[in-house]
Amino acid sequence: MQQQGSPSRGSGGKVIIIGATSGIGRELATIYAKKGYFVGITGRRNELLISLQNKFPKNIVTECFDVTQKENIPHLQTLIQKLDGLDILIYNSGYGDVSKELDWDIEKRTTDVNVNGFVEIICYAFNYLVNQGHGQIACISSIASIRGNSHAPAYSASKAFESNYMEGLYYKAKRLKKDIAVTDIQPGFVDTGQAKGDGKFWVMPVQKAAMQMYQAIKKKKKRAYITKRWWLIAKILKWMPGFLYKKIG
Ligand SMILES: NC(=O)c1ccc[n+]([C@@H]2O[C@H](COP(=O)([O-])OP(=O)(O)OC[C@H]3O[C@@H](n4cnc5c(N)ncnc54)[C@H](OP(=O)(O)O)[C@@H]3O)[C@@H](O)[C@H]2O)c1
């Protein structure tokens, strides 16, 4: 029986979070589960998926897979079946590392996760929601999407791909006159294993960042900077002339 005062399973909707074993994705899954959503979580580390499911056995189902492999869509279909539907899909899986020597392994892994895995899963989810007539897709891209970065060129380019693709789908949904929201989340530095490199500033706790992301998705924003003051950095980066940007980029 549902505890008095706690929301019933799925009362908020059915949400899939691709990449919810650690960091931002795990925190987002926790927020959604606590708010009564029925949540499908994915990632390669099954023990971490199971440990989160054990905390919210009525609200979380899991599907363990690597987005760089060939079976993305069958896994996604299985997860949608486990949830018995889909309202929101969030693509959070991401990889990036400093590639000062332009290391092909880093560049390839980055584009496999942030471009190829992203586009395959988002494309399927968008078409699923078009057929259904409603829903929402969101992606955790990055402030890094705004300019090319000499230290991590594949990361900044892959995040630009995500962000640009989401904008395309935003207008596609409008053109199709479908009730589909498309949200691009652009965080600055968040305190997870992924925040790498020197010169980090305004590093925010993952709980605070994830709560702001949840709110931006709920409000169906087209684009959200997390935390909000990163809007200013986004504007400065966008308009900074090359002779200045070359000192930091
Ligand atoms: N932390 C920051 O400062 C920051 C800033 C801007 C944007 N972001 C973005 O935020 C997102 C989440 O990152 P995070 O900071 O929370 O780092 P994280 O803790 O390393 O989380 C990354 C997530 O991506 C999943 N993932 C990575 N490779 C995968 C693969 N091949 N197949 C399936 N899932 C994979 C991981 O799951 P498994 O390892 O279990 O597969 C994990 O759940 C990323 O897209 C990142 O680019 C982070």
Image: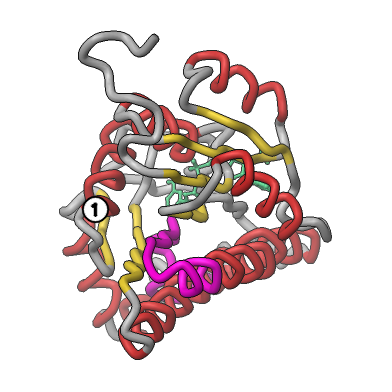
Q: Residue furthest bottom?
A: 175
Q: Residue at left 70%, top 22%?
A: 47
In the image: residue 114, left or right of residue 191: right
Q: Quadrant of ligand 1?
A: top right
In the image: residue 204, left or right of residue 231: right
Nearest the viewer among 196 and 211 is 211
**Res 206 seen here:** no
- State the image coordinates of residue 8 (x, y, percent, origin top left): 33, 25
- Mark 1 crowd level (few <14, some 14–19, many ≥20, 10 Å Cα): many
Look at the image and give the residue range highlighted in magenta: 126-150
The residue that mark 1 highlights is 216
Specify the amino acid type for callout 1. Ala
Q: Is residue 91 magenta?
A: no
In the rendered image, the vertical position of residue 162 relative to residue 188, given as above or below:
below
Q: Residue at left 31%, top 39%?
A: 12
Q: Is residue 133 magenta?
A: yes
- State the image coordinates of residue 99 (x, y, percent, origin top left): 66, 60
SS label for mark 1: helix
In the image: residue 64, left or right of residue 70: left
- State the image coordinates of residue 183 (x, y, percent, origin top left): 34, 64
Quarter of the image where the C terminus is located:
bottom left
In the image: residue 76, left or right of residue 201: right
Q: Residue at left 58%, top 52%?
A: 94
Nearest the viewer among 36 and 190 is 36
Nearest the viewer among 172 and 3 is 3
